[in-house]
Image: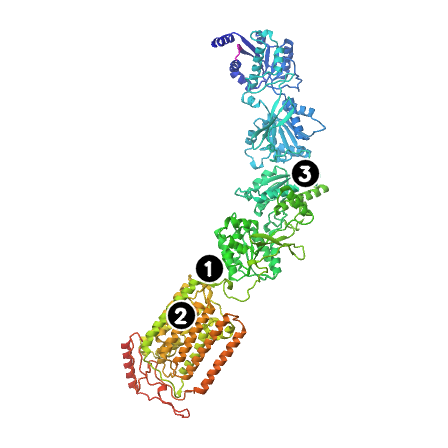
């Protein structure tokens, strides 16, 4: 049912036509002409279908050759238009003169004249007409959009840059004709020939020489997009693309500006992009996108309006001839809706297209819609939120063109190199901004205002060059920052490579490497250099009276700088650094992480401090490593009231953070070192002048307490402000980097932090002091203030006091009360239970082995009886040696007795002589023990070898070599008995000392005799093996054969009971074992046990009467009583004051009584039976060994094959009658015939061979 009207409409349309005229000319754009050729017919159909027209749209296209038809008087309406009775002419001739002809003809013939492909050309006198419509945007209206945006933002200092195209000339002229001269000033105007190939360099030169110097800050650009992109790049190069400037582009320039700007500068370093990339603002027509996408968009709009008009006016019911052009014009000027068009097409009352502009902002080569402007309202509407518009300089603040801007770049650490937020970053910005507000608010610089350009350095030196390039376009006058010395060095290098290096003033770079003004001429710092920390530390050490210190430092810029300065300062203060120079350096942390190399260096460095027994440790290093240093310091036992830790800025909030983050398990240990430690901190704000005002304003503005870096950033901006103020007053050029730098070096004012002045010839701020901080219960407490200008230097902080290590209220001395020759302090020594157990086990083993051997030996010797000396006998030198042995053993027992401090100096020397402990006698180094041990072991090996030779009857083998035979006989007679008997106690003691590891220090057991030797390591093992072999060779045979030696000595009168010799051996071994086990661990326990055992031994000796001579028994007993008395006094003295001289006096009195009593007893009851020799000496040989008491006859004693063969011999002098002392006759033996003696010797040797 609905198909019939539709079919009727199509049928009707195929008959009824709506003719519309179209005129083109040679001036028509060729691309438009080509498009019309291909798409015009389709466009006609599209319009017909989209509007559901009941007629056919027919465009009659006429081409006018205006190149040949130049005579205006010959111009006529095309004949085909007249034939078709066309009332509407679409003018695409793009010729204003011809258009004016058509306008006149339209009025005259009541046509509708629609101008497309160009706006109204007012320059050539074209004016609106009642029958003419202009379908292209008029540039006059865009000029009003520029006027309105300037008014909207309150700008006044304008610069114009436009090309010579007619449209842009119209736009510029309209703008100049209509701007309010009372509110705006066109300070500069640059006209560019759009047809010339203008380079960016030329544009830059023109901008620098005219626009920038004119003071114009809002630059209006009326050009094509390619030229506009060149201008924006030139703006960056001429430092007009930063904060304080605004660049506003017309609609033509904004078409594809982002893509063109990016692509046309692809070969340019992107870090130099400023307004070229971000910050430009411009207008774009509402329908621009459609016209860009479809070149026939205007024709589509024209045909749509024409068809809608005809339909509205009754066509096709009303014939075309009845519908006038003026009625169609009136309809279109009424601005009907156009549902089939994607945009609105409205006209003003004169028939000119109304303008509607979108406002766009370019950010990072991307256009964002931020508002719009309407010709109807003449208002700028900003739809973007606050802070969303990106102005030049990446600022979100609207440029202020009325005030001259001084751009200062702040290099701050917003994040670390890993992207984590850095806490001090915001505080630095706060301090900077507080100063900027005060300077601008107080008009310190007159009409000038300081503007901040912030750049997060990410604490990465590698970004310095990139950041400086990106900031150059901001017209930066000077830089503040960065935080670290490593960054500063990179930024100095980057700035130095620019054409006009600007000053760089750091608030945090302290490295001594940055001091030289010749090397780094564009650098200054408002923070004190590291070297001044060393001065403060050295002064503090001197104040404490310390002379001997241990110094360690980190091998980085900070540590090296402080250490170098510290070395220089202590040389003049009579302070000596004791620890080895090659053990002072510590590898730095890498990116804040303590490496294995760092840990190894710390261990080595502190071990060297321990080795030198130093009590004052000076740490000159980074707080990143301080926690590990303190941890190792605790492990090395360098803490407590005996030690002082002092350093530069090592006790910091960063240290506390690192401990809590990385050292949870050992935090308490670390604080044992940190608590009581002394460090430096930044000096607080002054209490007078600018200080209190800064503190109060910072707190008021940011509701937090200021930081040192915030204060220094604050003072640094004031440094720039005061310097520029002076330069302005003197008429100097502060835009010149060198002149500004020279002026900054001459600054002298008092800021919040103190006096800001720079040392001549350096980049360093003069010293203004530090705070002295103290670790107390895990907190950092400021206890003193250091002011180098104050005669007292260190002043106390009220309500605080220094708490030293271990909670002490007084500083430790730098020296120990007594000398202790060990690679660690005496207080570090503790009992090693493992070592004690080992000593006990070895001692127990030796005792039971000795006991077993003694029992076995006694079974062989118990039949031996000794003859008591009851009558005078001739004393031989061997008897004298036996008597001397009593004295020697006395001193040997004294040496192993409990330590008697009061007697030590006097008696020890004598005792150690008889203990063969020459190391102690000569007070030699402890390493001498190992030499002495080697000698003793060698003697043991030699002794064992000689014993083997004697047992093998080597004398018989050597009878052909008389000298060797006599030598062996001499050793058998003297060396072997002396070594096996008299030296048994000292040699056994020395051999056992190698196993005495009953103490430890620094987590290592050490050898008692040499604390420089760690037990059970590679150096110790060879001596253990050597000693074990020596003991194995010496001790068993010495024990077993000890009674033999006196029997082997011919001419010996003084004899000892074999039982006593074996018993004494067991006692000596037992006393040695007890001494090695207890003397070092518990002197009192050792004294008690030793005293009990020795008193028992003394009593048994008294009962046994071991010697065959009463006087020897007396002095043996006397010596044992004297040792017992010594042991008793030593034991009780250890419970009191062992070093008191009274003990020595009591000992001497006691010994005098004992010795005196013995002399009285001897004199009264014991006559001297050993008379000086007066007869012939015995010539019996050593192998005529053993004289046995058998009544009137001698018999040999059977021995096992393992024993030495015992030889019969003549009776000893004790068995012979002795001539009275007054008789001059000598007792002589009756010599045997030589043959008989030789035969006897041969028989004996054969018997020995058999026995062996």
For marks 2 and 3, give the CA distance.
Answer: 92 Å
Instruction: Name the element at disc 1.
Output: loop
Q: What residue did someone put label 2 on?
A: 937
| In this view, the mark in front (3 or 1) | 1
Asked whether 53 falls inside the magenta stretch, the response is yes
Asked whether 715 falls inside the magenta stretch, the response is no
Please name whichever residue, 2 or 34, is drawn nearer the observer in this view of the structure: 2
For marks 3 and 1, give the CA distance.
Answer: 67 Å
Q: Position of residue 189 (x, y in %)?
A: 67, 29
Residue 333, image quadrant: top right
Can you see residue 583? yes
Check residue 449 in the rendering and tell me which mark sits there, or answer none: 3
For marks 1 and 2, give the CA distance.
Answer: 30 Å
Q: Position of residue 421 (x, y in %)?
A: 55, 42
Q: Is residue 331 left or right of residue 49?
A: right
Q: Residue at x 55, y 64 (%)?
A: 816
Q: Position of residue 174 (x, y in %)?
A: 67, 23
Q: What residue did someone put label 1 on?
A: 1003
Instruction: Name the element at disc 3.
Output: strand
Q: Is residue 996 left or right of residue 506?
A: left
Q: Residues within 10 Å of mark 2 (few under 14, many from 20)?
A: many
Residue 562, image quadrant: bottom right
Which residues make up the magenta segment? Answer: 52-56
């Amino acid at each position: 049912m609905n198909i019939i009207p539709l079919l009727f409409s199509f049928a009707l349309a195929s008959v009824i036509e709506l003719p519309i005229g179209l005129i083109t000319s040679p001036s028509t754009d060729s691309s438009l002409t080509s498009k019309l050729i291909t798409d015009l017919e389709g466009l006609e159909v599209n319009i017909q279908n989209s509007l559901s027209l009941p007629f056919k749209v027919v465009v009659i296209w006429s081409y006018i050759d205006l190149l040949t038809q130049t005579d205006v008087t010959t111009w006529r309406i095309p004949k085909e238009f007249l034939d078709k009775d066309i009332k509407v002419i679409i003018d695409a001739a793009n010729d204003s003169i011809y258009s004016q002809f058509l306008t006149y003809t339209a009025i005259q013939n009541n046509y509708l004249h629609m101008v497309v492909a160009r706006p109204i050309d007012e320059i050539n006198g074209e004016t609106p007409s009642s029958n003419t419509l202009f379908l292209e945007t008029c540039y006059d209206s865009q000029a009003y959009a520029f006027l309105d945006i300037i008014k909207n933002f309150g700008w006044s200092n304008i610069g114009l840059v436009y090309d010579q195209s007619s449209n842009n000339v119209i736009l510029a002229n309209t703008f100049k004709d209509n701007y309010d001269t009372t509110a705006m000033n066109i300070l500069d105007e640059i006209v560019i020939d759009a047809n010339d190939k203008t380079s960016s360099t030329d544009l830059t030169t023109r901008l620098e020489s005219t626009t920038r110097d004119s003071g114009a800050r809002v630059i209006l650009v009326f050009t094509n997009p390619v030229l506009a992109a060149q201008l924006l790049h030139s703006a960056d190069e001429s430092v007009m693309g930063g904060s304080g400037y605004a660049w506003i582009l017309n609609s033509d320039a904004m078409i594809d500006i982002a893509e063109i700007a990016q692509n046309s500068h692809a070969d340019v370093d992107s870090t130099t992009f400023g307004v070229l990339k971000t910050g430009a603002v411009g207008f774009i027509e509402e329908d621009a996108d459609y016209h860009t996408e479809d070149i026939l968009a205007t024709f589509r709009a024209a045909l749509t309006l024409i068809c809608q008009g005809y339909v509205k006016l009754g066509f096709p019911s009303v014939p075309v001839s009845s519908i006038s052009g003026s009625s169609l014009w009136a309809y279109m000027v009424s601005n009907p809706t156009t549902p089939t068009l994607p945009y609105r097409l409205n006209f003003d009352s004169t028939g000119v297209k109304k303008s509607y502009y979108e406002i766009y902002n370019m950010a990072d080569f991307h256009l964002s819609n931020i508002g719009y402007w309407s010709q109807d309202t003449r208002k700028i509407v900003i739809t973007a939120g606050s802070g969303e518009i990106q102005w030049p300089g990446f600022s979100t603040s609207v440029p202020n063109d009325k005030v001259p801007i001084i751009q200062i770049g702040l290099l701050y650490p917003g994040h670390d190199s890993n992207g984590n937020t850095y806490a001090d970053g915001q505080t630095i910005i706060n301090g900077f901004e507080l100063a900027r507000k005060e300077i601008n608010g107080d008009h310190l610089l007159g009409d000038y205002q300081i503007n901040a350009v912030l750049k997060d350095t990410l604490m990465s030196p590698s970004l310095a060059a990139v950041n400086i390039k990106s900031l150059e376009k901001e017209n930066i006058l000077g830089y503040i920052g960065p935080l670290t010395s490593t960054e500063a060095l990179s930024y100095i290098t980057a700035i130095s490579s620019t054409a006009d290096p600007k000053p760089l003033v750091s608030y945090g770079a302290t490295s001594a490497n940055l001091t030289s003004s010749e090397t780094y001429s564009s650098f200054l710092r408002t923070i004190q250099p590291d070297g001044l920390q060393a001065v403060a530390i050295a002064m503090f050490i001197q104040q404490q009276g310390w002379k001997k210190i241990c110094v360690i430092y980190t091998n980085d810029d900070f540590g090296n700088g402080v250490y170098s300065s510290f070395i220089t300062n202590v040389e003049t203060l009579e302070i000596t650094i004791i620890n080895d120079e090659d053990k002072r350096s510590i590898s730095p942390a890498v990116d804040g992480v303590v490496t294995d190399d760092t840990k190894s260096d710390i261990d080595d460095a502190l071990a060297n401090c321990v080795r030198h027994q130093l009590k004052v440790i000076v740490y000159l290093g980074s707080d990143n490593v301080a926690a590990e240093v303190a941890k190792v310091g605790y492990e090395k036992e360098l803490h407590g009231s005996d030690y002082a830790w002092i350093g530069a800025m090592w006790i910091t909030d960063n240290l506390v953070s690192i401990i809590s983050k990385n050292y949870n398990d050992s935090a308490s240990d670390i604080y044992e070192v940190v608590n009581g430690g002394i460090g430096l901190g930044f000096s607080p704000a002054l209490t007078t002048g600018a200080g209190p005002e800064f503190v109060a304003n910072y707190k008021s503005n940011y509701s937090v307490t200021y930081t040192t870096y915030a204060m220094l950033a604050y003072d640094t901006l004031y440094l720039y402000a005061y310097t520029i103020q002076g330069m302005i007053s003197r008429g100097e050029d502060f835009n010149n980097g060198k002149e500004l730098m020279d002026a900054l070096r001459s600054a002298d004012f008092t800021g919040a932090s103190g006096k800001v002045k720079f040392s001549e010839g350096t980049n360093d701020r003069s010293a203004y002091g530090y705070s002295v901080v103290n670790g107390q219960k895990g907190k950092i407490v400021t206890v003193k203030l250091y002011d180098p200008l104050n005669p007292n230097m260190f002043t106390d902080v009220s309500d605080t006091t220094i708490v030293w290590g271990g909670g002490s209220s007084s500083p430790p001395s730098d020296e120990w009360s007594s000398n202790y020759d060990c690679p660690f302090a005496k207080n570090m020594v503790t009992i090693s239970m493992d070592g004690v157990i080992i000593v006990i086990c070895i001692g127990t083993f030796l005792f039971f082995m000795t006991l077993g051997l003694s029992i076995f030996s006694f079974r062989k010797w118990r039949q031996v009886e000794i003859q008591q000396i009851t009558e005078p006998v001739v004393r031989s030198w061997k008897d004298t040696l036996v008597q001397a042995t009593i004295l020697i053993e006395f001193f040997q027992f004294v040496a192993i007795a409990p330590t008697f401090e009061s007697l030590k100096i006097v008696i020890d020397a004598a005792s150690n002589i008889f203990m063969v402990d020459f190391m102690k006698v000569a007070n030699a180094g402890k390493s001498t023990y190992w030499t002495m041990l080697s000698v003793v072991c060698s003697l043991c090996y030699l002794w064992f070898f000689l014993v083997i030779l004697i047992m093998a009857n080597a004398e018989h083998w050597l009878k052909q070599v008389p000298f060797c035979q006599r030598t062996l006989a001499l050793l058998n007679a003297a060396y072997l008995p002396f070594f096996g008997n008299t030296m048994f106690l000292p040699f056994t003691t020395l051999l056992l000392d190698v196993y005495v590891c009953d103490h430890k220090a620094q987590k290592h057991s050490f050898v008692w005799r040499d604390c420089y030797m760690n037990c059970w390591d590679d150096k110790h093992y060879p001596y253990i093996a050597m000693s074990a072999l020596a003991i194995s060779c010496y001790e068993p045979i010495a024990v077993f054969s000890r009674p033999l030696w006196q029997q082997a000595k011919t001419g010996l009168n003084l004899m000892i009971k074999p039982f006593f010799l074996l018993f004494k051996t067991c006692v000596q071994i037992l006393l040695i074992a007890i001494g090695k086990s207890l003397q070092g661990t518990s002197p009192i326990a050792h004294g008690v046990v030793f005293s009990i055992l020795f008193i028992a031994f003394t009593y048994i000796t008294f009962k046994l009467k071991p010697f065959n001579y009463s006087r020897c028994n007396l002095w043996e007993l006397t010596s044992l009583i004297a040792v017992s008395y010594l042991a008793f006094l030593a034991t009780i003295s250890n419970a009191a004051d062992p070093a008191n001289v009274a003990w020595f006096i009591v000992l001497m009195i006691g010994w005098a009584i004992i010795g005196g009593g013995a002399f009285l007893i001897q004199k009264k009851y014991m006559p001297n039976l050993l008379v000086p020799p007066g007869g012939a000496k015995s010539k019996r040989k050593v192998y005529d060994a053993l004289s046995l008491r058998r009544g009137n006859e001698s018999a040999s004693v059977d021995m096992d094959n393992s024993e030495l063969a015992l030889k019969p011999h003549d009776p000893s002098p004790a068995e012979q009658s002795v001539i009275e002392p007054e008789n001059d006759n000598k007792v002589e033996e009756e010599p045997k015939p030589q043959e008989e003696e030789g035969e006897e010797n041969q028989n004996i040797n054969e018997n020995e061979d058999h026995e062996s």
